[in-house]
Image: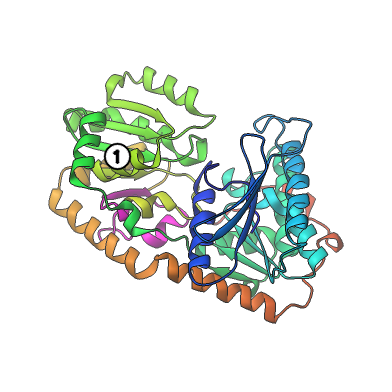
Amino acid sequence: MLSWEYPPVVVGGLGTHVHQLAVALAGAGHEVVVVSRHADGLATDETVDGVRIVRVPEDPPVFGFGTELLAWTMALNHALTRAALATCARFDPQVVHAHDWLVAHAAVTLAEHLRVPLVATVHGTEAGRHQGWLPETVNRSIHSVEWWLAHGSHRVIACSAYMRWEITRLFDLPADRVDVIPNGVPLDQFAVSADRVAAARARFGGGGPIIVYVGRLVYEKGIQDLLAALPRLRRRHRGLRAVICGTGPLEPELRQQATRLRLGRSVEFTGFLPEDDLTALIAAADCACVPSIYEPFGLVALEAAAAGTPLAVADVGGLREFVEPNRTGVRFPAADPAALAEAVDSLLGDQVLARRLSRTARAALAERYAWPRIAARTVDSYERAVRGNTPAPSPATHTIPAVRVREGNLLAGSG
């Protein structure tokens, strides 16, 4: 496996997914090597939880991830390629598995050099993150790499039926090349003791209900709509506190918005929280809100459900496939703060409903999203790639539809 993030380097849900999938595959008896980046500039090679992890820093010169993303990615891919080739001198893999476009060049190089199938998981798309538009050169460049990776892979894995629709539409990819395999969640990791829940409520609560958001602070996650809904919710629920967990480029703007709305102590930005503190906070919350404008899957919704926390989520993407209205949670139209407030209010104002929804959601997790089941489905995808190991169309032989990329909303009609 090739991934640009893997614990302890975790930026978002992708790193968590790769880690848990790798551990589940190793637990099922498969030999798994993950090649990823290392944050402190040192290369390491170790085995943890049955998974061999080779970590490398990106090559110099030093580029800024936020300001020179494409150059940074190329430097990382050179380092990943060398580390993977050196590793495979003593390891004979049957499949190369790439996680998202940031490792595409290393993955394609490795699969072609070893003459083994390439499987790619597309965790999200550049067009999707920009609501169907590719406004700048860098956005179009990223889209071209995504297209190239998808067409160069023997199998493509999508985390939801929505993402399969998006992938096949954006990349002109046959639907029978795309396997839908959702993310999983380790239920035992979110079993939090009553003492830890009480400590989290004492630390983060304001005497009233707690709403928690967990994720990157970027526009497509919709945190701005949650903040806009807080004045209305605060009038209805005395002592309400919204706790925003995560980091990202939108944080200064969100803090300014909170100041303009005079939210004061009703909102707290925690930044990055250690895993134990985060799981305790999620379990202590009265509602987990996922207000995304774009959400390929919504792993945080599963994690909150595993902790027994009622869910209010935007009616978008993969969130629809887990959160069924009045069964496993409540939904609201994306980018609609008034509707968000009503949905959250329905949970905070009806404890019987909230408890019933959280129980049903957790039961659905155990049935459909346990990691051993997700790992087995991933192995099925690997085996299809191996059995059909006729070369995938060479990415270099395709002309990426640059004109179409520049015109119109690529996801128009998605609902």
Residue, x 37% and y 33% (percent of image)? 244
**Rendered location of residue 84, percent (x, y):** 73, 55
Q: In the rendered view, does 274 fall on the left or right side of 15?
A: left
Query: Picture quarter containing residue 87?
Result: bottom right
Q: Range of the magenta residues?
A: 305-331
- Residue toward you, 54 or 349: 54
**Rendered location of residue 334, percent (x, y):** 42, 45
Query: Picture quarter containing residue 185?
Result: bottom left
Q: How many circles with numbers are drawn on the protein?
A: 1
What's under tag 1, amino acid-wise? Leu
**Rendered location of residue 75, percent (x, y):** 76, 40
The quadrant of the picture occupied by the N terminus is: bottom right
**Rendered location of residue 140, percent (x, y):** 73, 44
Work out whether 285 lies above or below 366. above
Q: Is residue 154 magenta?
A: no
Q: Is residue 306 magenta?
A: yes
- Residue 406 appears in the figure: no
